[in-house]
Amino acid sequence: MPSTRSALTISNLGRHLAHTLTSREWREVAHLFDGTFADTASIPPNEANRIGDLLHNAANHRLMPSDWGSLAAEIGTAAYAAARTGQNWEWI
């Protein structure tokens, strides 16, 4: 069953991601986490896998608070799971 988080929670996570990812990495996920996302995205498997990598790297960063790191890892794991199916990851 898909997990849902409020837009505020996702944008707050985005603030932490912006501080733990490089600027180039942040640009890859900002459209999902910068607080402006208000639609549905269908993310191809290769991009979902990359997002999973970025979120897991951020989750383990020394500047990431542990509670936010847990959320980043959870979403990253969901991205990996979607990528493994070979189908698009639906981001709502």
Image (tube, grey):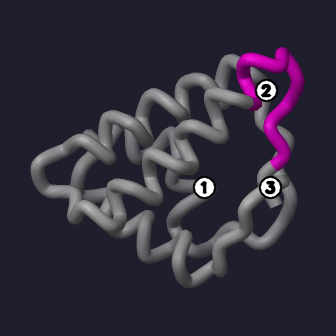
Instruction: Find numbered disc 2 in the image and state the secondary structure of the residue it sits on.
Output: loop
Q: In which quarter of the image is residue 42?
A: top right
Please state which of residues 80 and 39 is positioned toward the viewer in this rendering. 80
Q: Where in the figure is residue 50, as x and y percent of width and height?
A: 54, 25
**Marked residue nearer the N-terminal end (2 or 1):** 1
Q: Quadrant of residue 25?
A: top left
Q: Where in the figure is residue 8, as x and y percent of width and height?
A: 56, 83
- Whole-number angstrom distance, CA of label 1 to CA of label 3: 20 Å
Disc 3 marks which residue? Answer: 2
Disc 1 marks which residue? Answer: 31
Check whether the beta carbons of the residues at disc 1 and disc 3 lie within 8 A of each other. Answer: no
Instruction: Find numbered disc 1 in the image and state the secondary structure of the residue it sits on.
Output: helix
Q: Which residue is drawn at 50% across and 73% down?
A: 11
Q: Is residue 46 left or right of 14 when viewed as pictured?
A: right
Magenta-colored span: 82-90
Tell which tag, 1 or 3, sits nearer the viewer: 3
Q: Residue at x 51, y 67 (%)?
A: 34
Q: What residue type is labelled 2?
A: Pro
Look at the image and say whether residue 85 sits in the magenta stretch.
yes
Q: In this view, does 45 lie above or below 6?
A: above
Q: What residue type is labelled 3?
A: Pro
Quadrant, the C terminus: bottom right
Local crowd at mark 1 within 10 Å, few (<14), some, or many (≥20)? some
